Amino acid sequence: MIETPLFGRFLGENKRLVFMPPTPYQMLLKGTLIGGPGMILFGFFQQATGFDGPFTSEWWIVTGIAVFLAGVAAAFSLPSIAFDLGERHYKRRQGPGMFQTLRHGSVNELDAIVLIAEPNSRYLAGGVTYHLVLHWKGEAQPIMVLQQDTRLLVPGQPLNLGAQQLLTVGLRYAQAIGIQFFDNSHFASKCPVPIWR
């Protein structure tokens, strides 16, 4: 399953912890939401003034609509989760398709963050992808991959050798949220896939 990678960051003097797509995703999204209407306006400008541009006014309008709609679809399909560390609540947006589910809850519903290692030699020879996976108590909600990192290991090296960076941030995230943290990066795990009911 292909998912948009998330990265965590603390906001507001560490009062909030947010996991969102990285900055290039956000910039591309904003570019489509601003650029699409800009293209449409340029198409109308061409029609109104008779300006002879590189493409026809119809091309600018149709392409602008397509770019804008792609941005809207992306905006509705990007997963995220935000923790209010003072109020001890979270808001999660994730699920299959364009119209994702928005769920609210208390951090008391959360079980743990688990660091796992997924050998992925088909993707990158000698590569291991480490995942920080958020679990809910009693599997009340599907798991969520909070952050991931792929490293290249030399054959024969321990599987968890490249996990140090994600281990450090994972511990910090778990402590900030107030939940348990488990390091399972010393043995191979399958790619974590959330099962939506």
Image (tube, rainbow, N blue to C red):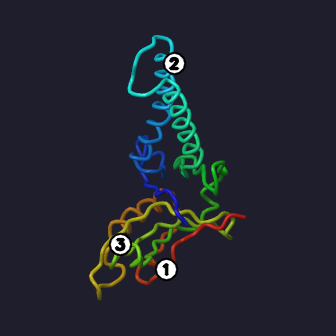
Quadrant position of residue 51? top left
Q: Is residue 149 above or below residue 30?
A: below
Q: Position of residue 49 (x, y in %)?
A: 46, 11
State the mark number for residue 189.
1
Cα gap from disc 2 to disc 3, whole angstroms: 53 Å
| Residue tagged 3 | 163
- Residue for point 46% across, 78% down: 184
How far from the left and from the top, in percent, is residue 123?
40, 73
Instruction: State which tag comes first along the sequence, 2 or 3.
Output: 2
Decide if residue 81 is in sight here: no
Q: Residue at label 2?
A: 44
Q: Is residue 118 left or right of residue 79?
A: left
- Asked whether residue 148 is in view, the answer is yes
Are the residues at dot 3 and dot 1 in contact (C-beta closer than 8 Å)? no
Cα distance, mark 1 to mark 2? 54 Å
Q: Label 1 neighbourhood size at 10 Å, few (<14), some (14-19), many (20+)?
A: some
Inspect the image, locate mark 1, and give the three-letter code of the amino acid beneath it. Ser
| Most foreground residue, 141 or 34 | 34
Q: Look at discs 2 and 3 and give the one toward the viewer.
A: 2
Residue furthest to the bottom in view is 156
Residue closest to the eye, 189 or 35? 35
Q: Residue furthest left?
A: 154
> Which quadrant would residue 155 be assigned to in this image?
bottom left
Which of disc 2 and disc 1 is earlier in sequence?
Answer: 2
Give the CA separation, mark 3 to mark 1: 14 Å
Q: Is residue 95 above or below residue 153?
A: above
Q: Amino acid at mark 3?
A: Ala
Would you say 130 lies left or right of 47 here? left
